[in-house]
Amino acid sequence: MESILSRVNVTDWLMSQGQRIPAGLGAIATAFLLTACGPQQQQISCESPAPKAAAANLNPSSDIQLSVLIDGTPSMQGYVNGLSDSRYNKTLQLIDSASSTGWNRAGTSVKYYRFGTQKQPIDRETYLRAQLPAFYQGGANFSVSRIDAALSEPSPDGLSVIVTDLYQKDADVRLVQNQLAQRFLEKGQAIGVLGVKSEFKGSIYDVGLTGQSFTYSTASKSSQSFHPFYVILLGSYGNVNRFFEQLKRNGLSDVEHQFEIFYPQPIQQPAMLDPNGIKGNSRKDLIQPKALNDGQVVVRKQNAQDPVQFFVMSSKTQATPLPVEIPYKPLDNVLPLDPTAIAVKATAEQYQKKSKNFQPINAQGIQLTDWKVAPQSIQFQSKFQADALEKGIYRFTFDASPSDLAEPAWWAKWNASEGSLSGDKTNNLLPFLRGLRLSTVELMKQQNPVIARLCYAIQKK
């Protein structure tokens, strides 16, 4: 009917049948029949999936309840022995400053503690004396460091700041890992680990299975030989990241440091294709039109900025991969993705004339391979498989999710092997950080966050 109506005037046809047509009715009838018998009109869109993490966890609180906890055991004394301007002391000053400037001053509550095998409340004046050797001579309850004793119950507006050298016996490392994972990661909280190398002059304790100790001095040595200490931040992602950024603004940027946030949600909003098309596509066998039309249906975007890519291909379309790069903005300071461990879930639909809609099918018209993750972009290859499709119009949606996180190089560089008397490294650092990474990865797999949603509409001629 459509091909006849495209060439025959409906008014003339009715008059040939002896019918009298009121003025204007012929044009209306023609428009109606052409619309009724013409191609169906379909509008499609590509909606971003809802983020797995609540916005409240990603944004910092307006008010904050801070707990600042200092490891008061003798192994920390070497950072302050005759070293009033050590990086350790500067960091304690930065923590004090960030506690009062990072949030609404009127709504900020700060509590201070010294910990060993137990947690002891102290006032701010005593906290400031942590820059002096006497602070680390607190008696029997402060002879051994137990980080698990410093942990508090998490709260939405709470943030714990723990300063320690992380010298724990092997069994204690596993205990701390489990405590952190169960009490914070599994409850939607983040764990930040800030590492700083500082001047040092004193004894290092609890090395190896036998708990050896040795003296170490960084006098006349380069900063690479300085002794590491750590600031552990526990709270919502937004509060952990805000505190770290405040430390940088107050002066941490002038100090060599390493920082990671363990959090199973790597991105706030998934990356998507450019609504203006894939840049750099000069192929004549793979056309990118504004709309698709196979005579049965005309497919258009719901709006001009919808990130759906339209392609027209034929049996002559080559399977040569088309390189694609899309903007990507991960959450600040989270562990980087492992680009070799990205899983892609694909769904395919074909327009059906009978139902006048897209229906699910089992077909592969596109393959996405060779994933690469850069700090600000995701790159991959789109391989179009014309032979896998019959003539028609198809819609493909791809959701990319990470299944592993990369291990930063500094973990191994700062780690001392079992029993090693290396003052510029930390005993058992690697198993501690790897344990946190594995806990984060397991939660990430359960939550299955989408880091990229890619939508294609294809017409096969």
Image: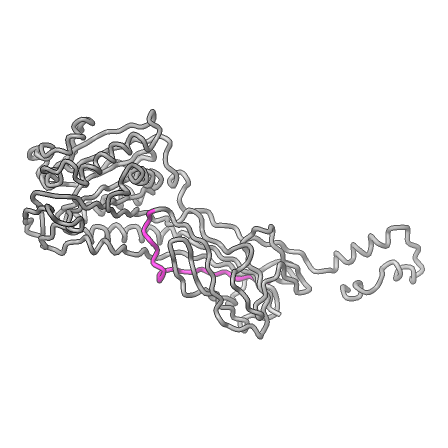
Instruction: Decide whether residue 335 is among the magenta residues.
Output: yes
Q: Quadrant of the N terminus?
A: bottom right
Instruction: Decide whether residue 247 is among the magenta residues.
Output: no
Specify the quadrant of the image occupied by residue 400: bottom left
Q: Quadrant of the C terminus?
A: bottom right
Q: Is residue 91 above or below residue 256?
A: above
In the shown orientation, is residue 362 left or right of residue 221? right
Q: Position of residue 2 (x, y in %)?
A: 76, 64
| Residue at x 25%, y 35% (from the top left corner) | 95
Q: Position of residue 132 (x, y in %)?
A: 12, 33
Residue span colored magenta: 333-350
In the shown orientation, is residue 337 left or right of residue 385? left
| Residue at x 27%, y 55% (from the top left corner) | 408
The number of numbered discs placed on residues in the rendered structure image is: 0
Residue extending farthest to the bottom is: 316
Q: Nearer the viewer, residue 81 or 410?
A: 81
In the shown orientation, is residue 460 left or right of residue 87? right
Q: Nearer the viewer, residue 294 or 104?
A: 104
Can residue 117 be seen in the rendering of this structure? Answer: no
| Residue at x 74%, y 60% (from the top left corner) | 37
In the shown orientation, is residue 243 left or right of residue 84? right
Q: Nearer the viewer, residue 366 or 181?
A: 366
| Residue at x 20%, y 39% (from the top left corner) | 163
Q: Position of residue 13 (x, y in %)?
A: 88, 62
Can residue 430 be seen in the rendering of this structure? Answer: yes
Colouring convention used in this rendered image of the protein = one colour
Residue extending farthest to the front is: 220
Q: Position of residue 417 (x, y in %)?
A: 14, 56
Q: Is residue 23 above or below residue 461?
A: above
Q: Nearer the viewer, residue 100 or 273?
A: 100
Specify the quadrant of the image occupied by residue 68: top left
